[in-house]
Every structure is written in C-alpha cells, then in structure tokens.
Image (cartoon, rainbow, N blue to C red):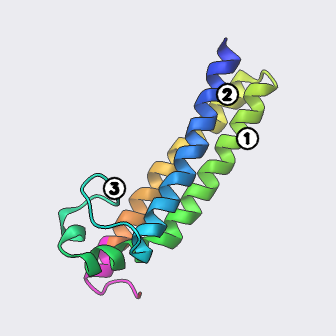
C-alpha cells in the first residue's frame, strides 16, 4: 500500500510540474486569457492582456527549467517507489517539490522584473 501511495504521489508531482510549465507557456503565447485562477501570482501581472502575456513570456524559460528538473526528480522518485526504496523516494520527492517552489518563485520574480524593464525581454 505504501508503494502505491508513493507512486501515486510521484506521478502527481511529475504531472503537476509538466502542467505548470505548459500553462505558463500557453499564457505567454496568448492562448489562455488572463484569469485569477491560472498563471503567476500578482495583480500587476493581470492589468491587461498584453502585460499578462509579456510577463508570462518572460517567465517561461525559468518555468520550463524548474519544471523539467522537478519532473525528472519526481520520475526518479517514482522509480524509487517501484523499487521499494522509501528513503530514496522521500529524498527525490522532496527535492522535486523544493526545485518546483524555488523555480516558480524565481520565474515570478522574472515576470515582475520584466514589467519594470529590469530584465530584458
């Protein structure tokens, strides 16, 4: 039962990381309209559609980097769960979550910085 729950958690973490990157990318391309439910946090990012797109486009590279690393670590934890390594699973799952949180915080900073001309588009 523990292996099933660990595997499920790892699979959900990997899927969430990939989904986050895809959503930010699609917002940057203008395929998803501004909405409070999706996208990077901050009211300033949602002032108008071009600002919303531009900010998400600026955050896209960091988002893809962080989410790719997080998804790879989550898939590693999935393999560890299947092999019965609970310690390895825990290390990789926590690493995945930390990379995701820190990476998305940096991507959000990048989005806000792009609005002030502090970061080149």
- Residue at the extreme right of the image, as rendered: 83
Q: Which residue is mark 3?
A: 38
Q: Which circle, 3 or 2, is nearer the viewer? A: 3
Does the segment drawn in magenta span residue 73? no
Which residue in the protein does label 1 denote? 76
Q: Position of residue 81 (x, y in %)?
A: 73, 26
Q: Looking at the rendering, which quadrant does residue 54 occupy?
A: bottom left
What label sits on residue 7 in the rendered view? 2
Q: The residue tagged with tag 3: helix, strand or loop?
A: loop
Q: Nearer the viewer, mark 3 or mark 1?
A: 3
* Residue drawn 29% across the image and 51% down it: 37
Around disc 2, counting alpha carbons within 10 Å, would you say few (fewer than 14), some (14 to 19), or many (20 or more)? Answer: many
Give the CA distance from mark 1 to mark 2: 10 Å
In this view, the residue farthest toward the top is 1
Disc 3 vs disc 1: Cβ atoms closer than 8 Å? no
- Please provide the residue range marked out in magenta: 112-120
Locate the C terminus and report the quarter of the image it occupies. Answer: bottom left
Residue 84 against residue 36 in the figure, above or below? above
Q: Is residue 63 above or below residue 10?
A: below
Of 89 and 17, the residue lying toward us: 17
Image-based side of 46 in relation to 3, left or right? left
Q: CA distance from mark 3 to mark 2?
A: 27 Å
Task: Check residue 118 for magenta coloring.
Answer: yes
């Amino acid at each position: 039962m523990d292996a099933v729950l660990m595997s499920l958690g790892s699979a959900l973490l990997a899927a969430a990381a990939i989904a986050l990157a895809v959503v930010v990318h699609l917002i940057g391309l203008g395929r998803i309209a501004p909405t409070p439910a999706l996208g990077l946090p901050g009211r300033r990012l949602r002032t108008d559609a071009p600002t919303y797109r531009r900010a998400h486009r600026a955050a896209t590279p960091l988002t893809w980097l962080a989410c790719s690393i997080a998804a790879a670590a989550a898939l590693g934890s999935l393999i560890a769960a299947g092999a019965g390594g609970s310690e390895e699973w825990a290390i990789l799952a926590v690493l995945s979550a930390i990379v995701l949180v820190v990476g998305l915080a940096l991507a959000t900073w990048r989005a806000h910085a792009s609005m002030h001309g502090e970061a080149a588009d």
